[in-house]
Image (cartoon, rainbow, N blue to C red):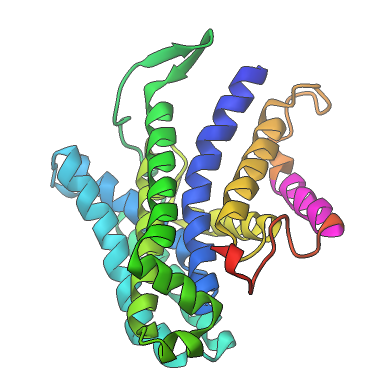
Amino acid sequence: MLAAILVKTVVYGSVYALAAIGFSLIFGVARVINLAQAAFSVLAAYILYGLVSPVIGVQLALAPALIISVGGAILLGIFMYKFCVDPVREHHGAVLLITVAFAMLIEQGLSMRFWSDPASVDSFVQGSSTIFGVGVLNHYLLILGVTVALVTALQLFLSKTRMGIAVRAVANDTEVASLMGISPAKVLMITIVIAAALAGVSGVLIAPLGYFSSPHKWGSLLMLLMVIVVIGGLGSIKGSIIGALIVAFVEELCIYDPLKLFGYGAAYLLNGFVMLAMVIVLVVRPAGLFGTLFEEEKL
């Protein structure tokens, strides 16, 4: 049982981390709290479901379907930011309302076609492997591999490339970055693309696990993302990863209930225990585990 808990902690923690990193990245660079981040994950999952299943009469191969699914999340993210968020970016209340409105529009748009249909697709890779005597689905290994690759690529981008250094500069001080010849508008657009892409990838990776039971699932996923970034420290990529693993571990403990404290498991108390974990962390560290909102280390 412990092995199963640890495996699922890493798997679900990985996909949560991808979406949460995008959430933190947008805040760290643009000081924007994007409440539509979870909805982009749901959107990508349902686009994939629609493209590879006969539900809408179009059945594509997996590779082009994945590209279109993630690309759809990216395009909508660009549209939302360019035409709706950027003009009012300094008005934080308006930004919150716009992003949550976009999330609800995505939900309603998907519900018109799928309603309560789960975004159920086959695993990208079939079968399982044995690692240290534990059977692990190959799709789990794929999720872990993709997550490690993307996080590593993002860290290298931020630390080794000129555009990545520009992103860090804008995150630290927009005015100084502008004086250095960096275009904040270009940097913010790149950030939005990265964040939406991470959300889209997390959505398509978790779709085969049956996570998106309906288009309404974005609300519970958004709650988890917010808890993750609060635990890790809003604006911290490293914190988002650690926070995602903590949340996933608490989830799996509730589901499996290894000590049999609740008889048949405590899955119905999952949200309460996740919130409790957040409260405990905030009592010890009010800024989160790696809460460096306005320091260079946040990215």
Q: Is residue 42 visible?
A: no
Q: In this view, does 97 lie above or below 283?
A: below
Split into 4 quadrants, where in the image is the N terminus?
A: top right
Q: Is residue 69 visible?
A: yes
Whether residue 197 appears in magenta in the rendering, the answer is: no
Is 201 on the left-hand or right-hand side of 101?
left
Q: In this view, does 62 lie above or below 100?
A: above
Q: Is residue 144 above or below residue 39?
A: above
**Which quadrant holds residue 144?**
top left
Residue at image x 27%, y 47%?
48
> In front: 220, or 70?
70
Q: Give the range drawn in magenta.
A: 271-283
**Which quadrant holds residue 230?**
bottom right
| Residue 222 locus on image (x, y percent) | 55, 59
Question: Magenta residues: mostly which secondary structure?
Answer: helix
Q: In this view, does 79 lie above or below 214?
A: below
> In front: 211, or 156?
156
Residue at image x 73%, y 59%?
288
Whether residue 281 appears in magenta in the rendering, the answer is: yes
Label count reads 0
Is 8 on the left-hand or right-hand side of 277?
left
Residue at image x 35%, y 49%?
45
| Residue 137 locus on image (x, y percent) | 42, 21
| Residue 36 locus on image (x, y percent) | 46, 68
Is 226 on the left-hand or right-hand side of 268?
left
**Which quadrant holds residue 262?**
top right
| Residue 116 locus on image (x, y percent) | 42, 50
Residue at image x 14%, y 42%?
59
> In front: 262, or 239?
239
